[in-house]
Each structure stands twice: as structure tokens, then as C-alpha cells.
Amino acid sequence: MPKNRIVKLDEIRSRCQSCSLFELCMPMGLAEGDLDKLDSIIKRRRPVEKGEYLYRVGDPFASVYAVRSGSLKTFTSTRDGRDQIISLHLPGELMGLDAISSNQHICSAMALETTSVCELPYERLEALSLEIPGLQHHLLSLMSEEIRHDQCHMTILARLPVDNRLASFLVNLAERYRTRGFSSTEFNLSMSRNDIANLLGMAVETVSRLFTQFQEQGLLQVERKHIKILNYDILHTMHNRCGELDANDEEADKDNSSSSSP
Amino acid sequence: MPKNRIVKLDEIRSRCQSCSLFELCMPMGLAEGDLDKLDSIIKRRRPVEKGEYLYRVGDPFASVYAVRSGSLKTFTSTRDGRDQIISLHLPGELMGLDAISSNQHICSAMALETTSVCELPYERLEALSLEIPGLQHHLLSLMSEEIRHDQCHMTILARLPVDNRLASFLVNLAERYRTRGFSSTEFNLSMSRNDIANLLGMAVETVSRLFTQFQEQGLLQVERKHIKILNYDILHTMHNRCGELDANDEEADKDNSSSSSP
DNA sequence: CGACATGTTGAAGCGGTTCAAGTAGGGTGG
DNA sequence: CCACCCTACTTGAACCGCTTCAACATGTCG
């Protein structure tokens, strides 16, 4: 089971009560004054409408963004002009940290629905993280979390057949909704079939076929974007378990067949 | 062309002269005293022999490691027991930062040849980065670099046919060797065909066939692990250019066909 | 309502895997 | 030093998972 990435709703305090920055400010138990400091650098901005860009590849890197509501996809463009979707971002997640080293955004972010975000000017955030205890660690931790996620996705793309990929996607979504206090068995997809296919490295038609197949198998009930999970267990069996560490890990990598052991 | 990830050899100073920690300590122009501080937390350890683990999935996270010489692969295990190689690490690179959020290693690291590393106890490193100007930013920057790399690899796995994947791999290797002052046209692979296949999400046989195909096309000369690149341009044409930002990026993602523009 | 985007379904084709067999290093022990 | 073995690698041929192409259905929005 992945570690909870945000804090329970009832633990949220004062200012950020109406804000989805849980993940960013809460986990290290912020003092009142520190919370003020954080609040002071946050820029509110008008919602990003469906299809609008929050930022684009190559934009100068000035801020990171915390999703308050709605959802966005990030994607890069390959040289042949087609896009590759990198990830889906839900409320409570921080986006844009991947631009730190290049000082410009390395992917574009587009809203999948009307989406509101908080803008955090990065320089001020970085400065603040030298002051506020735990903030530095938290930023580093968030990035490490993102690396873990990406590695998991790489494994999915490299190793799994298409049905397992879709199952992984759905299980992951379910978990994330559950963590946010929503139903983990019934939700609406904010991504189109096209986007899902792209994210999972397959053809749209395949996604379509898999949804009907899953439905015929009694795993799901699908109606357009509405998903109802009927048999979570089987889906979970199919999904890639990377990132789920448990006690007896030593036996997991016992047969490392590749380049020799001495 | 990816940004240079390490500093030119003649810019290296004093203590770390014999060390490949360029990337970690150099880019922000360390003061003499700060360099001492950094040196003081570094643990030297005996070389890791080929096939030995530097760390394993699930190991408690205590340190990050800078590769001084040699090379390592990192990999996770999927639930079916097979491994998925995540990346190859060459001298000058820092490994293990992905363990920050979970506090245990999320992948295993195994030496591909006799490899020497410097161990940096993470807690002390994090503490130090509150003191040494620029170190915090550098750590964040390194992680952002890793995210960029992973995203690039995701794109390769999701979109490219096998020949382009291998070309991408070789071009990437060539660049990294060049940056390190080695020949970018002639080098030895430290990975086995098996490992390469695994990393690129394909079958060993395919890698083998592609090498002979590339050779027949006059792109390469291959002899076992020794690679000589004969036509870099064509390989470069095949390779995925993600992460290579340039001035006219706005036209790159003009036709974003997926979920609507307003 | 018509037009266009999005989603579904079927049938053909192919890229890459899998299976099988054979070759070539590299190390070990006699 | 060679015979041996084991592993890494290569090559061929059959198969199949998924894509592609094409046609149709369903929503959605001006």
C-alpha cells in the first residue's frame, strides 16, 4: 500500500483549510507563523479552463503549482510532433518541480476540466525552505515521490501487457481518490480515451476494447467517463505493485538472472 | 543537446580532485570551508564488485551514493518476480535520492563492474544543505534532472519502435561519455544484452538483431561489448529528443489533438 | 438540427516476442 | 595447455498481441 501522500481532512488547519496544499504544508506540522509565511507567498489565480495551458514546454520556470481542484495532464512533445502524456495531476499535488534544473518547463500542463491552482513562486519557496524547519525535507520528499511514481510508470510501460496497464491505471486512480476522501470504487475519468491510451502507450481502440472486455468480465461498469469498480481484487491482482514495499522484500529479488553474481 | 551534467575536468579543485563528486559539489562554486564540510561527511568504502549490491529494495535509507568509477544498474522487481531495470549510473552521478520519501530504497543497485562509490549519509547531507549556500538548490536540481531523465525514458518506452529505442540508448550513452571526457564514438558497454533489452522494454533477441542490423547499415561497428559509432547523425535522427529544449518550442506542441482546446 | 469530436467495433496486417537451435567467449580444473 | 562447461550472444522461423485501417455509433456544441 503506497504511503498516504496527503493528510487526513480533519487534520487541516486554519488558512489552508480551503486549500489543497495539504501535501505541501501539512506533513511536517507547521507552526502558526510558518503557515503565515507560506500563505504570504501564495498567489491565487483565476481557474484554468478545460484545454487551457497552465504552462508550456520551454516556458521560463518561475513557479510551481499546487492543484486545488480539477485535474491536469502534463505532456512532452516527441520530435515527430506527437505528444506523450507523462502524468495526471489531481488535487493536493504539486506540479512543475521538474523544471528546477533546466530553469524552463520540460513539459506542458493542460487542464482536463476547470481547474484551480495555487501558484508558488519558486525562488521564494526555496528561500522559505531554508527558514521553515522540515520544508526543505518535504520538497525533497515530494520530488522523490515523483521519481518513484515515474519509475513505476516506466515498469508498467516496459513490462506489462495492455490489460494489466489499464488495470494499474484504474487501481492507481482508485487509491488516489480514496486518499482524497472520495469513493475509490466509483468515479469519473477526467481523461479522454485518447489521453488514457497515450499515457499507457497503446492505441485508443485498445483502451476501448479493454473497457468493454473488463465490463464483460464483471470487473467494471463503464458508461462513458463514469467508472464503477465491481471487482477490485482482480484488478488489483493485475496491477503492477511497484512501490509497495513490505516486510519480506529480500525474497523479491532473489533471482536476479542478468549480469552475473560473483 | 542535454545540458552538461558535470563540470569540466580542469575546473575541479583540491580535495575532490580525485573524486567524481563534481556534479554534487562543484556547480555552485563551493568555498574552501564548505568543501571541507562536505569532505568531512563523506565515507569512503571498499569497491563494490561486479554483481554485488550497493543497496537493495527495502533497505533502510541511510545514505546516498556518488559513483566515482565503474557503473551500476538500478532495478525494481515486479510482482511476477522479474526485474525491471530503471537506469544505468555512470561516474559523477548521485544515486539513492529516490528513497527520501519512503525512507527505504525503492530499487536495488547492483554493480555492473568493479565500482567505487562515495557514501554520503543523507541526514548529514540534508543538514549541510541548510548551511552551504546553493547546496539545497543543487540537490533539488539533481532530483529534477532525474525526473527529466525518467520522463524521457517513459516517452521512449511508450512511443518508439525498438530500433529508435536502441538508438536513443546509444546516443544517450555517447553524450554521457563525451561529457565525462571519454570518446563519444567508441566505448564499451557495461550492460549485457540482457540488461539493455530489459531497460528498453524488449526481448534480448531483438537487441541482438538490432545490433547486427545497425552494423549492416553502417551505423555501428559492434564486437561483443565494444561499440564504435560510425554514423552518429543517423542514430541521432532516430533518437528521442525529449529534454532538448530550444528557442522555437512553441510550434512543437501546436497540434495537441487530445482533449480539446477551448 | 447538423457538424465535428469522441468513442466503439470488426477485420487485416505487422512488429516484435517466443521458441528452438546453434555459436562463441571466458573461466575452471585436470 | 587443452577439454570442458556455463553463460552470453546470435540467428532463424512460427506465432500472437496489438496496431492500423475502416466504418459506424454516440455525444456534444455551435
Image (cartoon, coloured by chain):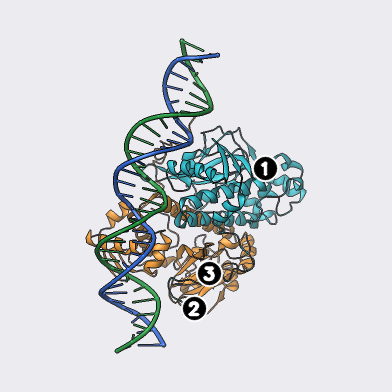
Chain colours: A orange, B cyan, C green, D blue
Same chain assignment for discs 1 and 2 = no
Q: Which mark is residue B253?
A: 3
Which chain does the numbered disc 3 sit on? Answer: B
Position of residue B222 measured from the top left corner of the image (x, y, whole percent): 56, 39
Q: Is residue A240 left or right of residue B156?
A: left
The N terminus of chain B, quarter of image:
bottom right
Position of residue A20 measured from the top left corner of the image (x, y, whole percent): 47, 69
The amino acid type of the residue labelled 1 equals Phe
The amino acid type of the residue labelled 2 equals Pro
Q: Nearer the viewer, residue B238 or B64?
A: B238
Dot 3: few (<14), some (14–19), or many (≥20) neighbours within 10 Å?
Answer: many
Q: Which mark is residue B182?
A: 1
Q: Is residue B240 above or below residue B190?
A: below
Q: Is residue A25 visible?
A: no
Which chain does the numbered disc 2 sit on? Answer: A
Secondary structure beneath label 3: loop
Q: Earlier in the sequence, mark 3 or mark 1?
A: 1
Same chain assignment for discs 2 and 3 = no
Q: Which mark is residue A47?
A: 2
Asked if labels 3 and 2 touch by Cβ distance under 8 angstroms, the answer is no
